[in-house]
Amino acid sequence: MHFGGPLLQTTLLIASVWKLAACSEVTIVGGHEVKPHSRPWMVSLQVDNNHICGGTLIRDQWVLTAAHCKGVFGESKKSVTALLGAHSLTSSKNKNTQQVAIEEYYVPGTYSDRTKADDIMLIKLKTKVKTNSKTVKVKEVSKSGKDLQAGTHCHVTGWGVVSATGSMPSDTLQGAEVDILDRKLCDCFYNRNPVITQDMLCASNNKRQADACKGDSGGPLECNKAFVGLVSGGMGCGNPKKPGVYTRFSKRHLDWINKIIKHQSNPANVGILFCRLSRAGYSSVSPTFIGGSPGQVGNCMDQA
């Protein structure tokens, strides 16, 4: 396994403004190395064996990640693989890891690269992975869909860069503790660009300036051990005034995830899926859902 090269240079240019943890080669800032294989559901999504995005194994043939990662993967799926069971990316070729090809991507038709709305993607793997080992296990998405209160303690994990100015990914899996931020305050910090909707979360760690960074996109956000969201992006890394932004698993997102997995696992049900999504207000058979509701602007100076 190696890093850098033309692919890395190209993806870093793409991420010049919004920190696409999708830009590979790019770990958790202000964090620490996690205990090896303590997060056996972690997936390294790679192009030509280079780490690009994080992901979470939620079924034995399904990975959940961020929609913006697909823009870095490109249209061809031949060079994209999912690496499971790894702790060190450079020592991943051993009996504990599984590297699986991609069968299909499922991205909401309402995903917007401009607004960052519905930054979520399901990946169906070519084959089912073996989940009966200590190094590869499924992590179920939280079923509650409930919003999180400001101040909730959470944990984010990934192989991204370990400094805001870094360009190389972490070799080993890193983790950091972050706290959920008031949505109105976060919306104010970003000057509503993007608007922080009810389907998003913001989180930061002011004391350690811990944050997800480039290469962490699509990785899991866990709060009280529940898988409640995934890394979407932000501006810079570790800046309390520009906290990390996460896709929240709201009830509408959960509904989309469950319907896609259920019906794509049985192609004969695609027609039924179309009818149900249409009645629910979805715009097409492809993974699509209605846009999020905007947050309201708070007073940054008053709340900072």
Image (tube, rainbow, N blue to C red):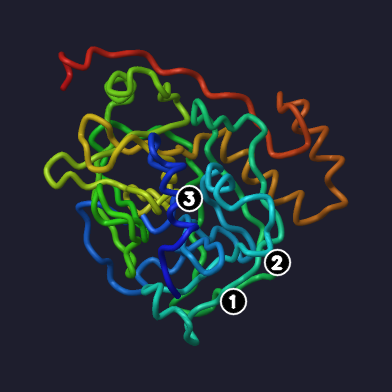
The amino acid type, in three-letter code, at marker 1 is: Lys
Question: At numbered mark 3, what does the secondary structure look like: helix, strand or loop?
Answer: helix
**How far apart in space, not on screen, are marks 1 and 3 (Cα)?**
34 Å
Q: Say the numbered circle drawn on residue 130.
A: 1
- Which is more toward the observer, 154 or 43? 43
The percent position of residue 6, horizontal first and vertical second, equals 48, 58
Dot 1 and dot 3 residues touching (CB under 8 Å): no
Question: Which residue lies at the image location 63% right of the left edge and 25% below the top edge?
Answer: 290
Residue 186, by quadrant, is top left
Mark 1 Cα-neighbour bin, 10 Å: few <14, some 14–19, many ≥20: some
Above or below for 195 versus 160: above
Q: Residue at x 72, y 51 (%)?
A: 262
Closer-to-camera residue (60/29): 29
Query: Is 114 positioned to the left or the right of 200 in the image?
Result: right
The structure residue drawn at horizontal position 63% and vertical position 50%, both measured from the top left corner, is 74
Disc 2 residue type? Lys
